[in-house]
């Protein structure tokens, strides 16, 4: 009986699983009307109703079965297989000879029982051959039907595919389709090349009705401690130009405490990515390399960056000033040597080159940080730091009202001692199921007052200095290290929060007072400093399971007029959602720019669940300051357990050089087997 069961198990592993190449588990139950076993020939026969079920739920039904001693010859009639939750095979006759299993008058579907209306799709074939050595399925005289053989959609005299046990197989993939008003219909034909389980490549040839063909390549390689990713495209357009792009991202583990990265992002011109659909609203491309070293209390990184500007008009207020070659920085933090007091040592080396000028800087800083929790929950943090900068400038431009007034070459240095004392008192109470927290907070920062030198402030780092709720209570409220606070100031504010299992509320309001009022009035007007006091900054947020709303703002302390506000809203549940984003700012982008760069932008998105499986989505970005719709897009999405498809569009109204607003339509289709998309 044990030998008989092993025979039946072998059957499940061979003939029953032929159609999908799925290895089935050991049988759990075997039922048959009549079972015969020939002791001399060691041949097994089963006749009548026979059913086998394994522990994972896979099952087989058949009427008759004959199997040889070595399982080389197997024959079965009227067989039905359920190889997964929804994968079903039926055949009138199955025979196995050597490596080939042949099913005649066969039906195959991976959508059995997925839909109340019947199987979403089925394949009927006069003959299906499964080669277990090549792991291929060959369909002869195959027809594709939908919904219980109600609607035929495709007939093929011959069709072949790898069985699902094959994870990777070289061959053509399903084509995709795009349509744009500038380049017409685009048909993408991808070809997949498999080198190994960890190394593959996809090449795609795109035919365009209004342009020359486009060639794309995507290469992937995974090694034990590294991964390499490269993709790019090339075309020789109808105007005789070679246009292309190349993206590369490699990550290499150099041991437990080191990692290297290489990244490349380049394109032939500013508009290629946008015209051919590779643009992701990036203002510039960044290429370079990075090496990281890290330990429990230390971290160091060396990187280099070469930028490519993509914006059409790059004034001083937002242009990239040059390439960074190199940038080396590191920090080391000691263990506490007294209570929770510790020492932090950091260094920074930076080289910037570009626009016929270059500069190098070396920065070293030592900081002692001592946090204390005293009576009544009062929390104090004291910090003292010394910093020394050395710069080597070569033809560095110096600006005045966005105009270059001179250039400077030479060595400059500065000593920047500073320290701060921060206090906070978090108070909380619990009432019913709510927890309430209120925390007043203040930080006094003391810095040496030194004469302001413009050559430091515009050369390497961003000159952005707008006060916000995120820069309050920072060591340096400016972006970067070159622009530095000048003098003493105090930040203060309060945070109130309340939360329970379903709700979360937060309110914060703060302000800065600069003791050097003359400097504040002259140099910080963009933040609303008057007599040393800044504008108020803050945020308000509320969230629960299906609802989130937040606002970050800055308003005038005298008349409460707004100068900056950012709002976001999300409401959504079960396929329905609404998102709204809003930003309004009356300030210029850069304090060294005299141009008026007011911002007023609104973005919105909506999703609707039209039926149980049909969804509609739409999004838009609107520039209310210039009364221009930057772009809008949406589509219809159908999600079935066995397949999914979408019809989408996007309208881009950008006008840049040879690129003038483009509308793109795309159609995508995919199959699903047991919940997995293909």
Image (tube, helix red, strand yellow):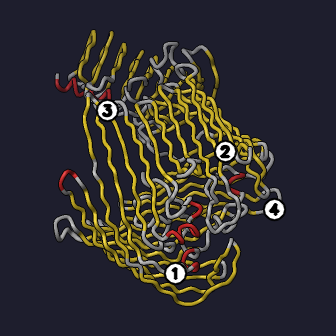
In this figure, which residue is indicated by the disc labeled 4?
240
Q: Nearer the viewer, residue 209 or 279?
A: 279
Specify the label residue 500 is tagged with: 3
Residue at image x 32%, y 68%? Answer: 294
Q: Secondary structure at mark 2?
A: strand
**Residue of label 2:** 188
Q: Earlier in the sequence, mark 1 or mark 3?
A: 1
Front label number (1 vs 2): 1
Marks 1/4: CA–CA distance: 56 Å
Would you call the spot at circle 3 few (<14 residues within 10 Å), some (14-19), or many (20 or more)? some
Q: Residue furthest bottom?
A: 410
In what quadrant of the picture does the N terminus appear?
top left
For numbered disc 1, what is the local secondary structure?
loop
The numbered mark, 3 or 2, whose residue comes first in the sequence reads 2
Q: Is residue 302 left or right of residue 636?
A: left
User: Which badge, 1 or 4, comes first in the chain's sequence?
Assistant: 4
Question: Is 486 drawn above or below residue 599 in the view shown?
Answer: below
Q: Marks 2 and 4, Cα distance to the nearest angstrom?
A: 22 Å
Q: Residues within 10 Å of mark 1 (few under 14, many from 20)?
A: few
Helix or strand or loop: what does disc 4 sit on? loop
Name the front one of labels 1 and 4.
Answer: 1
SS class, disc 3: loop
Residue with the mark numbered 1 = 451
Relative to 534, residue 333 above or below? below
Label 1 vs 2, first from the N-terminus: 2
Alpha carbons under labels 1 and 2: distance apart: 62 Å
């Amino acid at each position: 009986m044990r030998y008989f069961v092993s025979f039946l198990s072998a059957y499940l592993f061979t003939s029953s699983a032929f159609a999908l190449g799925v290895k089935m588990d050991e049988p759990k139950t075997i039922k048959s009307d009549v079972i015969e076993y020939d002791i001399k020939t060691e041949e097994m026969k089963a006749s009548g109703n026979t059913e086998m079920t394994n522990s994972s739920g896979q099952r087989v039904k058949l009427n008759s079965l004959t199997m040889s001693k070595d399982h080389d010859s197997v024959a079965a009639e009227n067989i039905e297989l359920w190889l997964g939750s929804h994968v079903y095979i039926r055949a009138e006759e199955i025979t196995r000879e050597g490596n080939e299993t042949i099913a005649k008058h066969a039906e195959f579907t991976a959508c059995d029982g997925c839909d109340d209306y019947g199987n979403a799709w089925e394949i009927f074939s006069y003959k299906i051959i499964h080669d277990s050595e090549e792991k291929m399925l060959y369909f002869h005289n195959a027809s594709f039907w939908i919904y219980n053989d109600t609607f035929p959609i495709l007939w093929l005299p011959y069709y072949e595919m790898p069985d699902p046990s094959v994870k990777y197989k070289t061959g053509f993939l399903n084509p995709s389709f795009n349509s744009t008003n500038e380049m017409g219909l685009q048909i993408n034909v991808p070809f997949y090349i498999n080198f190994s389980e960890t190394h593959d490549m996809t090449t795609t040839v795109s035919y365009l009705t209004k342009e020359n063909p486009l060639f794309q390549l995507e290469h992937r390689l995974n090694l034990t401690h590294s991964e390499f990713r490269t993709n790019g495209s090339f075309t020789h357009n109808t105007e005789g130009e070679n246009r292309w792009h190349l993206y590369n991202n490699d990550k290499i583990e150099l041991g437990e405490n080191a990692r290297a990265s290489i990244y490349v992002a380049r394109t032939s011109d500013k508009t290629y990515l946008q015209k051919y659909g590779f643009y992701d609203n990036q203002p510039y491309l960044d290429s370079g390399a990075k090496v990281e070293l890290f330990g429990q209390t230390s971290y160091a990184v060396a990187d280099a960056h070469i930028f490519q500007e993509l914006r059409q008009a790059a004034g001083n207020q937002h242009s990239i000033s040059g390439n960074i070659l190199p940038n080396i920085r590191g920090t080391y933090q000691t263990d506490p040597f007294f209570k929770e007091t510790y020492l932090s040592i950091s260094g920074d080396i930076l080289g910037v080159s570009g626009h016929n000028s270059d500069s190098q800087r070396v920065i070293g800083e030592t900081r002692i940080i001592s946090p204390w929790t005293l009576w009544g929950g009062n929390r104090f943090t004291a910090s003292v730091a010394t910093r020394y900068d050395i710069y080597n400038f070569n033809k560095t431009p110096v600006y005045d009202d966005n105009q270059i007034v001179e250039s400077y070459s030479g060595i400059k240095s500065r000593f920047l001692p500073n320290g701060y004392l921060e206090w906070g008192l978090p108070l909380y109470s619990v009432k019913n199921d709510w927890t309430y927290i209120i925390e007043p907070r203040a930080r006094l920062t003391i810095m040496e007052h030194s004469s302001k030198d413009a050559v430091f402030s515009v050369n390497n780092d961003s000159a952005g200095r707008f006060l916000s709720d995120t820069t309050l209570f920072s060591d340096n409220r400016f972006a970067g290290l070159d622009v530095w606070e000048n003098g003493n100031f105090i930040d203060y504010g309060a945070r109130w929060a309340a939360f329970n299992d379903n709700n979360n509320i937060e309110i914060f309001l703060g302000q800065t007072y600069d003791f050097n009022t003359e400097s504040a009035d002259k140099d910080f007007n963009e933040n609303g400093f008057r007599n040393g006091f800044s504008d108020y900054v803050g945020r308000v947020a509320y969230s629960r399971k299906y609802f989130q709303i937040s606002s970050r703002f800055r308003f005038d302390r005298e008349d409460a007029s707004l100068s900056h506000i950012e709002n976001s809203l999300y409401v959504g549940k079960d396929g329905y959602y609404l998102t709204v984003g809003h930003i309004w700012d009356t300030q210029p982008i850069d304090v060294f720019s005299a141009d008026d760069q007011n911002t007023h932008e609104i973005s919105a998105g909506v999703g609707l669940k039209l039926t149980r499986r049909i969804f509609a989505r739409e999004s838009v970005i609107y520039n209310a300051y210039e009364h221009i719709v930057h772009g809008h897009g949406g589509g219809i999405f159908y999600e079935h357990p066995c397949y999914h498809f979408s019809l989408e569009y996007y309208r881009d109204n950008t006008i840049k050089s040879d690129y003038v607003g483009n509308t793109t339509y795309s159609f995508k289709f995919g199959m699903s087997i047991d919940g997995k998309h293909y």
